[in-house]
Image (spheres, rainbow, N blue to C red):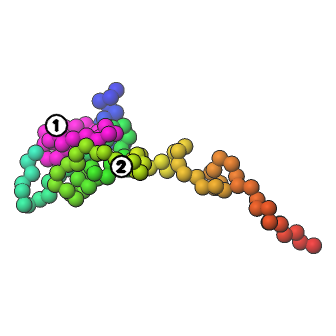
């Protein structure tokens, strides 16, 4: 069943073609705290074409689950992959985009919020005479 799933779906795991390409030309570079694995092409020709880099997501393919250091590496902002990341005490932990999920931000008074905002006490509805 997993084999058939890899033939037709790309959003849950790597496809069969990606698995084959990674096995044939990929060199494992590292992984992040979310379990994503990062690769680069083994046969990169220096000074001609930029090195090909890609990520194999753990679980659903969600681009916002790539930490900032790895995002910079995969987009050729740095030549070396990031080392172990030690966040500062004031930094919040990285998490993916929560839009459309139960954890999404819903401002006070939003239609999709948990409780509607009460009417202001100084508001008086207009009543035609």
Can residue 78 be spotted in the picture?
yes
N-terminal of the pair, mark 2 or mark 1, is 1
Which residue ends up furthest to the right in the rendered image?
Answer: 129
* Residue in the image at 80% along x and 66% along y: 122
**Element under disc 1:** helix
Residue 61, image x and y in percent? 36, 44
Residue 105, image x and y in percent? 54, 51
Does residue 31 belong to the magenta stretch? yes
* Residue in the image at 88% along x and 69% along y: 127
Q: Answer with left or right where residue 52 lies relative to residue 45.
A: right
The part of the image, by quadrant, that contains residue 47 is bottom left
Which residue ends up furthest to the top in the rendered image?
Answer: 1
Q: Which residue has dot 1 on it? A: 23
* Residue in the image at 53% along x and 45% along y: 103
- In this rendering, the label closer to the viewer, 2 or 1: 2
Q: Which residues are magenta?
A: 12-41
Q: Residues within 10 Å of mark 1 (few under 14, many from 20)?
A: few
Which quadrant is home to the C terminus? bottom right
Q: Which residue has dot 2 on it? A: 88
């Amino acid at each position: 069943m997993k084999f058939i799933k890899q033939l037709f779906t790309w959003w849950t795991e790597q496809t069969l073609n990606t698995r084959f390409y990674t096995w044939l030309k990929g060199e494992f570079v590292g992984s992040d705290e979310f379990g994503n694995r990062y690769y680069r092409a083994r046969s990169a020709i220096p000074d001609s074409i930029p090195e090909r880099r890609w990520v194999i997501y753990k679980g659903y393919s969600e681009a916002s689950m790539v930490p900032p250091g790895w995002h910079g590496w995969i987009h050729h902002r740095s030549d070396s992959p990031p080392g172990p990341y030690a966040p500062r005490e004031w930094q919040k932990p990285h998490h993916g985009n929560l839009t459309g999920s139960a954890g999404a931000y819903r401002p006070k008074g939003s239609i999709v919020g948990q409780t509607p905002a009460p009417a202001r006490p100084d508001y008086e509805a207009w009543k035609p005479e």
